[in-house]
Image: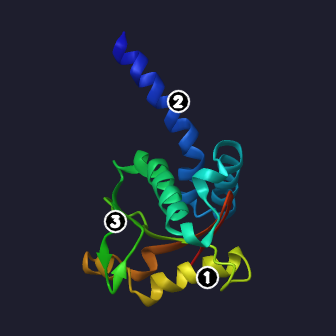
Amino acid sequence: MFFNLFRGWFEVVRQEYNEFVNALLAGNVKAMTNYMNDVALETFSNFDTGRRASKRTQPERFYHGFVLGLLVSLRDEYQLKSNRESGYGRYDVMLIPKSREKDAIVMEFKVYDEDEEKGLSETVAAALKQIDEKNYDAELLSLGMEKERIRHYGFAFEGKKVLIGKV
């Protein structure tokens, strides 16, 4: 009885997360962005997400933890890594497929800097540029992943606003 009760709780949670995870696996950046913005608007507080430049690392950490929580349901299909060194720096999140038929994924999170960027699109571009410049693919390539099987996602955050881009 208790087993079925607990299993039911986790199945409900997984269903809520599946919208984001399915969009990620399909490469549907628009659906990923919509999901993140809907959840942020309905659930998060500005206190959670922060906005001021002096608190730049806090919102990135908050969203980083949130995205990791969304991805945990993939642990049977992917090895999830967070804040690990690869190439010339440290990526935010990497998903290494346990099956060669699936693509690998590298994610970089950035908080919008109004002094240096004109909008969230520039923040996304900076995140994607960092993945490339820091050669975060090095770990995946050393594991035998083909370059064309590695997807890059840049996440930009400004308070409760989220924009996601990919290469």
Mark 2 → mark 3, Cα distance in angstroms: 29 Å
| Residue drawn at 41 percent across, 63 percent down | 102
Q: Nearer the viewer, mark 3 or mark 1?
A: 1
> Which residue carries the number 2 mark?
12
Q: Please, is residue 76 above or below residue 5 in the view?
A: below
The N terminus: image quadrant = top left
| Residue drawn at 53 percent across, 51 percent down | 21
Q: Position of residue 66 (x, y in %)?
A: 50, 51
In the picture, the disc for residue 125 is 1
Q: What residue type is labelled 3?
A: Arg
Residue 3, by quadrant, is top left
Q: Please, is residue 132 above or below residue 45 in the view?
A: below
Q: Nearer the viewer, mark 2 or mark 3?
A: 2
Determine the secondary structure under disc 3: loop
| Residue drawn at 56 percent across, 78 percent down | 167
Along the viewing direction, whichever of 144 and 75 lies nearer the viewer: 75
Q: Which amino acid does label 1 sit on?
A: Ala
Residue at the far left in the pictured view: 143
